[in-house]
Every structure is written in C-alpha cells, then in structure tokens.
Amino acid sequence: MNTFARIGFAALISVTALAGAAAPAMAWDCIAVSEEGSYGYSYNYDDKGSAIERALNECANRTTSDSTCEIVECE
C-alpha cells in the first residue's frame, strides 16, 4: 500500500468514526388518544415500552372510565 492509499484509508476511518460518534441516540415519542378525544404523550424516552406506558397513563388520567386510550403514533 503506497503512502497516498494509507492517507486516504486513514481519512476514511476517521470520518467514519466521527460520523458514528455524532449520531444522536434513539429517543421514543408516543401519542395516545381516547375515543372521546382525550390524549396523552411522551417524548425523549430511551425505550419504546416506557414511552408507550407514559402516553397511555397520561391519556387515561384525562379521560373517563368509559373510554379507552390507544397509541396512535410512536416514533
């Protein structure tokens, strides 16, 4: 491998390492809505299960016992 190839390879590795380090961590945001229009949401959770639970709990606190909350979006 010549000098030019080594420099190019080193640059490629450096750029790849920096790009991986700069990537944001995955955060979960969810929205729950009830049949009567009440809602609940969560944002910036590390795991999907916790985000879903928070959105559903918030929705349930805002609705009557006759209505059911469902997750309508979770990213």
Image (tube, rainbow, N blue to C red):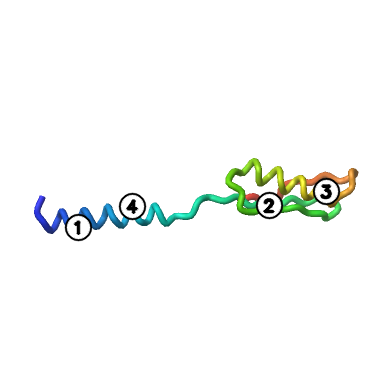
Q: Amino acid at mark 4?
A: Ala
Q: Which mark is residue 8?
A: 1
- Distance from the alpha carbon under mark 3 to that under mark 1: 58 Å
Pointers 1 and 2 in contact (CB under 8 A)? no
Q: In the image as oriented, which residue stretches furthest toward the left? A: 2
- Check whether the beta carbons of the residues at disc 4 and disc 3 lie within 8 A of each other: no
Nearer to us of marks 1 and 4 is 4
Q: Secondary structure at mark 1?
A: helix
Quadrant of res 43? bottom right
Please state the horizontal and vertical placement of residue 54, each as a whole percent of the image: 71, 46
Q: Crowding near pointer 1: few (<14 within 10 Å), some, many (20+)? A: few
Q: Residue at x 42, y 57 (%)?
A: 22
- Label 2's element? strand
Q: Which mark is residue 17?
A: 4
* Res 38 → quadrant: bottom right
Residue 57, image quadrant: top right
Q: Is residue 52 left or right of residue 23?
A: right
Mark 3 lies on a secondary structure that is helix
The reply, left or right, for residue 36 in relation to residue 32 is right
Q: Residue at x 78, y 54 (%)?
A: 39
Could you classify mark 4 by the number of other residues whose Cα lies within 10 Å: few (under 14), some (14-19), or many (20 or more)?
few
Q: Earlier in the sequence, mark 1 or mark 2?
A: 1
Which residue is label 2 attached to? 42
Amino acid bearing label 1: Gly
Residue that badge 3 annotates: 61
| Nearer-N-terminus badge (4/3) | 4
Residue type pointed to by label 3:
Asn
Name the residue: 44% across, 55% down: 23
Front-most of 33 and 7? 7
